[in-house]
């Protein structure tokens, strides 16, 4: 895997975690105290960071081989966008309709 693939995976992972934090924080900030809201948002964003990293891990990786540790694929990027779309629907779209 080239450095460009690693940079793209890093950017996608960080952007998805930041967007998750922002959506969760904005949803809860009017309902709960700001510190607790921030903790909930950070924990949720951490799980998104972890799940996105697991999503891009090479399934056939063996230590000492020339295979890349992380693989950039269309299916992984598509699953990531679907996860963010579901979070958007739950935390932004549905509450704004009420």
Image (tube, grey):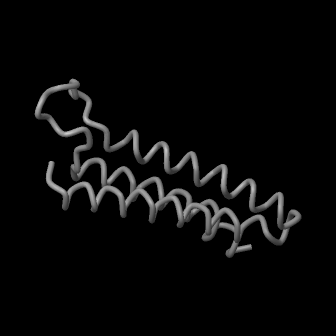
Quadrant assignment, res 56: top left
Which residue occupies 83% across, 57% down? 36
Q: Residue at x 14, y 34 (%)?
A: 67
Placement of 12 over or under 46, stated as above or below: below
- Image side of residue 63 versus residue 81, left or right: left
Q: Is residue 80 left or right of residue 91?
A: left
Foreground residue among 69 and 81: 69
In front: 64, or 35? Answer: 64
67 or 45: which is nearer to us? 67
Question: Horizontal and vertical percent for residue 47?
Answer: 56, 45
Q: Residue furthest front?
A: 64
Viewer-proximal residue among 79 and 56: 56
Q: Residue at x 67, y 62 (%)?
A: 24
- Snapshot quadrant of residue 33: bottom right
Query: Residue 49: x, y in percent?
Result: 49, 50
Q: Residue furthest right?
A: 33
| Total tally of numbered discs in the picture | 0
Is 69 on the left-hand or right-hand side of 10?
left
- At which x and y percent is residue 7? 28, 61
- Residue 68, image x, y percentages: 18, 39
Q: Is residue 26 above or below residue 56?
A: below
Q: What residue is shown at x 40% (from left), y 39% (from top)?
A: 54
The quarter of the picture where the C terminus appears is bottom right
């Amino acid at each position: 895997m080239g450095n460009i693939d690693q940079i793209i995976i890093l950017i996608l992972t960080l952007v998805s975690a930041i967007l998750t934090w922002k959506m969760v924080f904005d949803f809860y900030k009017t309902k709960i105290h700001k510190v607790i809201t921030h903790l909930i948002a950070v924990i949720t964003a951490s799980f998104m960071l972890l799940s996105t990293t697991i999503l891009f891990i090479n399934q056939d990786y063996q230590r000492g081989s020339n295979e890349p540790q992380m693989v950039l694929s269309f299916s992984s990027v598509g699953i990531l966008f679907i996860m963010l779309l579901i979070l958007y629907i739950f935390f932004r779209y549905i509450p704004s309709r009420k």
